[in-house]
Image (tube, grey):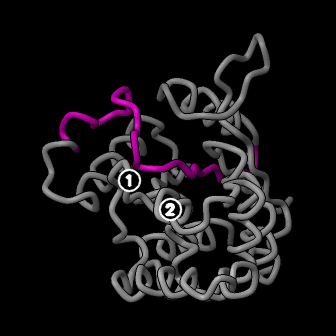
Amino acid sequence: MSKRLYIVVEGDTEEQFVKEVLTPYFNTFEIYSIHATQITTNKRLGAKGGFVNYQHLKNDVLRLLKQQDVIVSMLVDFYRIPGSVPGYDQAMLQSTSIKKIEVLENAINDDINDHRFISYIQRHEFESVLFASDAGFQKYYNEPAQVLTRINSVIEQFPNPEDINDGPETAPCKRIIQIIPEYKKVVDGNILALEVGIDTILQKCPMFKAWIEKLLLAMR
């Protein structure tokens, strides 16, 4: 039996990203069983979405790992990550977000303690990958002209989109909304990601690329 890949995600945007962007990419490697599932926040009520408590994520991961022939991963934002995540206090002592994420991912891997699980924390919001190129913005938001000018100013400022900071007003999503007030996260975000293209995202976002490479290796 071929392996199945399950990615536990934070919300609607990430779920659609897995389905619409990652799945076709994995298909090119003859990996066809890819599933995105939102974090279960209340099993009794069937509530899903949001990362407010690590135990919710852990419960889903352990449930999925009870199956045979699976690889399980996760896709959540570092921004406002809950303090209940293993290694949180130690991580917050680190000097950079990269080092903080490394501590958190290692602690989560240790806590789950299963070689079939691969933790991944997106350094900033999903929208950071949209700044890998202006292709999506150029196609859908090319008027007025200053929209593209402001988008390209951000792209030029951050050759690595993962470096875009996560302040309340400077996080990737907030930057887009300031420039394009009508931006809708779930629908527009994934349309833009498709236009940017997975190859460009992988080229410009090294932490994201490293995660995808781990998944491809694990799925062999």
Q: In the displayed structure, does residue 144 sit left or right of residue 15?
A: left
Q: Contact, CB < 8 Å: mark 2 with mark 1? A: yes
Q: How many marks?
A: 2
Of the residues tagged 2 and 1, which is closer to the observer? 2
Q: The residue under label 2 is which amino acid type?
A: Gln
Q: Residue at x 27, y 57 (%)?
A: 97
Mark sitting earlier along the chain (2/1) = 1
Q: Which residue is mark 1?
A: 169
Q: Residue at x 75, y 79 (%)?
A: 140
- Residue furthest to the top: 44
Q: Which residue is mark 2?
A: 178
Q: Nearer the viewer, residue 169 or 109?
A: 169
* Viewport quadrant of the N terminus: bottom right
> In the rendered image of this protein, does residue 117 appear above or below residue 122?
above
Question: Is the residue marked by circle 2 packed among few (<14), some (14-19), or many (20+) residues within 10 Å?
Answer: few
Left/right placement of residue 37 relative to residue 73 reads: right
The Cα–Cα distance between marks 2 and 1, rounded to whole angstroms, is 9 Å
Q: Is residue 82 magenta?
A: yes
Q: Is residue 6 left or right of residue 30?
A: left
Q: Which span of residues is magenta-colored? A: 68-91
Specify the quadrant of the image occupied by residue 191: bottom right
